[in-house]
Amino acid sequence: MAKTKKVEWPLAPAPESKDHFTLKSEYDLFIGGKWVKPKSGTYFDTINPANEQKIARIAEANAADVDAAVKAARKAYDNVWSRMPAAERAK
C-alpha cells in the first residue's frame, strides 16, 4: 500500500481570534472625514455573539447626526467623487 504524503497548510488566524487586530474601547461617528461625537450623546455596547462579552461602545446616531452625514456625503460627491474618473474612483 502506498504511503500518503502529509501536507502542511499555512492557516490564517481564526476570525474569532483577537490577536491579529486592535480595537478601541469606544468609537465615535465618522462624518465628513473626521471622527465626531454623536449629537445624541448616546453610546451602546456591541457584544461578541460567540462569548457574549462586550467588544466596544459605539456612538448612536440620531436624526441630526444622520443629516450631517448625508450633507457631508453629498458635498464629497458634488466636489470630489462625481468629477473623478471611474478608474480613479475604483482604486
Image: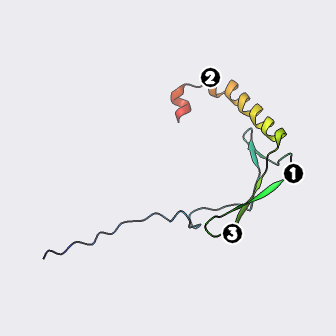
Please give the name of the residue rendered at 83% of the width and 47% of the height, measured from the top-left corner.
38
Colour treatment of the image = rainbow
Q: Which residue is mark 1?
A: 41
What amino acid is found at the position of numbered circle 3 in the picture?
Answer: Gln
What amino acid is found at the position of numbered circle 1 in the picture?
Answer: Gly
Residue 11 in the image: state x and y as whole percent.
Answer: 42, 65
User: In screen coordinates, is 86 left or right of 24?
Assistant: left
Q: Which mark is residue 83?
A: 2
| Callout 1 secondary element | loop
Name the one closer to the observer, 47 or 24. 47
Q: Which residue is mark 3?
A: 53
Name the one closer to the observer, 55 or 80. 55
| Callout 2 secondary element | helix
What amino acid is found at the position of numbered circle 2 in the picture?
Answer: Arg
Quadrant of the rendered image containing residue 22: bottom right
Please identify, in this view, whether the residue under mark 1 or under mark 2 is nearer the observer: 1
